[in-house]
């Protein structure tokens, strides 16, 4: 079974631009979560989608948004990029409420 | 703020030795999970232990949970160079969603050959 796939692997953007990251979950997993990882703040929860609905949201500004498609694939978007948005963005999928998360290898975003 | 706090922040041992990492948390939990992350890559789930469990084993891994002290420990026995990674504990608060994990900042384990 293929794992969680995130694209692109690396991304370099300029302040003020916007970016879209993509995540394909493990087949059969309907929940997709997104996390931001930085050296200073560690792993921080962004949001979680299930059957195209956002069920949980972390404490991030509205510039961070996401969506999930009918095939469970998910995208997250960051608008008006700031230098502090530079991070590793991790996507994870899960089969059920009591199941562990399966993470992708992340998208490394650098904002200059 | 972080719910789980790992201790120590960094640990360096020789191959064959045991490694113990600790995790403390603040609020009541539904379950606690341990994950491993190799440099620059995604996290890999190791063990999930529920609040009504005290100990779990998986291969060379042993996890204990003490809900009265709000702490957990991860023991890796007979460590190998391939165990070099960051280890994170993550908690799901009581009544919370298993999808919204709160991670600690991790313990960086280095196993020297």
Image (spheres, rainbow, N blue to C red):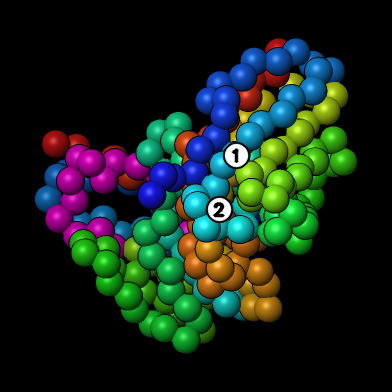
Vertical relation: B59 (above or below) B14:
below
Disc 2 is attached to a residue of which chain? Answer: A
- Residue lying at the far front of the rendered structure: A70
User: What x and y, as percent, mark residue A22?
Assistant: 63, 34
Which type of secondary structure does the marked residue at label 2 adopt? strand
Q: Locate residue B28 relative to residue B18 in the image: left or right.
A: right
Q: Are both tags, 2 and 1, on one chain?
A: yes
Report the residue at 36% width, 74% height from top.
B64
Disc number for residue A93: 2
Vertical relation: A40 (above or below) B23:
above
Q: Give the mark nearer the N terminus: 2 vs 1.
A: 1
Q: Is residue A8 visible?
A: yes
Disc 1 is attached to a residue of which chain? Answer: A
The magenta segment: B75-90
User: What x and y, as percent, mark residue B18?
Assistant: 20, 57
Q: Locate residue B68 relative to residue A84 in the image: left or right.
A: left
Q: Give the CA separation, mark 2 to mark 1.
A: 9 Å
Report the residue at 76% width, 33% height from top.
A77
The N terminus of chain B appears in which quarter of the rendering? bottom right
For disc 1, the marked residue is A23
Q: Locate residue A28 relative to residue A35 in the image: left or right.
A: left
Q: In which quarter of the image is residue A51?
A: bottom right
Report the residue at 50% width, 81% height from top.
B51
Viewer-proximal residue, B42 or A1? Answer: A1
Viewer-proximal residue, A7 or A64? Answer: A7
Contact, CB < 8 Å: mark 2 with mark 1? Answer: yes
Q: Is residue B24 visible?
A: no
User: What x and y, as percent, mark residue B75?
Assistant: 28, 63
| Magenta-drawn stretch contains B87 | yes
The C terminus of chain B appears in which quarter of the rendering? top left
């Amino acid at each position: 079974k293929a794992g969680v796939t995130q694209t692109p692997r690396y991304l370099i953007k300029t302040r003020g631009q916007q970016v879209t990251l993509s995540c394909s979950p493990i087949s059969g997993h309907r929940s997709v979560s997104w996390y931001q990882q930085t050296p200073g703040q560690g792993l921080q929860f962004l949001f979680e989608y299930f059957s195209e609905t956002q069920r949980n949201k972390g404490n991030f500004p509205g510039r961070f948004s996401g969506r999930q498609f009918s095939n469970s694939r998910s995208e997250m978007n960051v608008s008006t990029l700031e230098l502090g948005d530079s991070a590793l963005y991790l996507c994870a999928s899960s089969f059920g409420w009591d199941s562990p998360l399966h993470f992708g290898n992340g998208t490394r975003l650098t904002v200059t | 703020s972080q719910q789980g706090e790992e201790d120590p922040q960094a640990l360096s041992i020789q191959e064959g030795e045991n490694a113990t990492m600790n995790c403390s948390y603040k609020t009541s939990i539904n379950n606690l999970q341990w994950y491993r992350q190799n440099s620059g890559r995604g996290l890999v789930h190791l063990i999930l232990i529920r609040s009504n469990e005290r100990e779990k084993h998986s291969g060379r891994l042993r996890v204990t949970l003490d809900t009265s002290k709000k702490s957990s420990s991860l023991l890796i026995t007979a460590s190998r160079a391939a165990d070099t990674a960051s280890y994170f504990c993550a908690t799901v608060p009581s009544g919370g969603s298993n999808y919204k994990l709160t991670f600690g900042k991790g313990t960086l384990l280095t196993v020297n050959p």
